Amino acid sequence: MFDAECDLAALVYDQGDEPDQLLREFADRLRARGVRAVGLVQRVQRSLDAHEIAATLVHSGVEISLLQRLGRQAGGCRLDVGQLLQAGSAVAGTLSEGADLLIVNRFGRQESEGGGLTYLIEQALAADVPVLIAVPCFRFAEWINFAQGMSVRLPCTRRALDQWWWSVSRRCAVFDKNRPTICELLK
């Protein structure tokens, strides 16, 4: 599935980093310039009474809650896998219509076990669409295993994102939508 020609980037973050905000702003800037960015970005809202995690679909702005309502005393993982897959399905449909970039909010436990949104990464790479995914430091070894080592590691900074995108977009520029991309021709 992966090869040295793919444009797969891991935005690696640690505690104190803000990958969600960074990805959201990055996607907004690209879309304002006419780039067809699709995917989802996580939004976390914490208060004394509640903890909410949602995914915002990059291409439409629609927000989908990702947590199950289990009550205050519930323990364990509260991720609603059905909601995650619903969000992924919306992204997959838009991705199949054409995209310049796929953004995936996280490489989490579901993805490290081969599930979650890994199918979106495979779909994008099969269509020669660059992929950007946020990866926590503690899952980076699992990410490298999943990506078979064919990934760029980016620090969690705007500058790193901008430099990576400039390189990828120049290399994969589409001059005529009816002709193959540069990346397709070079493979």
Image (cartoon, grey):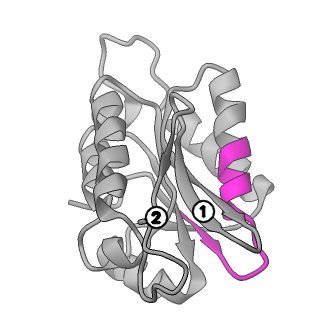
Tell me the CA gap for discs 1 and 2.
Answer: 7 Å
Does residue 71 appear to the left or right of 116 in the view shown?
right
Q: Is residue 148 visible?
A: no
Query: Is residue 11 highlighted in magenta?
Result: yes
Quadrant showing the N terminus: bottom left
- The earlier-in-sequence mark between 1 and 2 is 1
Residue 74: mark: none
Circle 2 residue: 67
Does residue 9 appear to the left or right of 46 in the view shown?
left
Residue that appears at 69% across and 34% down: 28
Residue that appears at 34% across and 33% down: 95
Residue flagged by tag 2: what amino acid is it? Leu
In the image, which residues are magenta?
10-25
The one nearer the camera, 93 or 159, is 93
10 Å crowding of disc 1: few (<14), some (14-19), many (20+): some
Q: Quadrant of residue 118?
A: bottom left
Are discs 1 and 2 less than 8 Å apart at CB? yes
10 Å crowding of disc 2: few (<14), some (14-19), many (20+): some
Secondary structure of the residue carrying numbered label 1: strand
Residue 52: mark: 1
Secondary structure of the residue carrying numbered label 2: loop
The one nearer the camera, 117 or 126, is 117
Residue flagged by tag 1: what amino acid is it? Glu
The one nearer the camera, 55 or 122, is 55
Which percent across, then down, holds residue 153? 57, 70
Query: Is residue 165 highlighted in magenta?
Result: no
136 up-or-down from 67: above or below? below
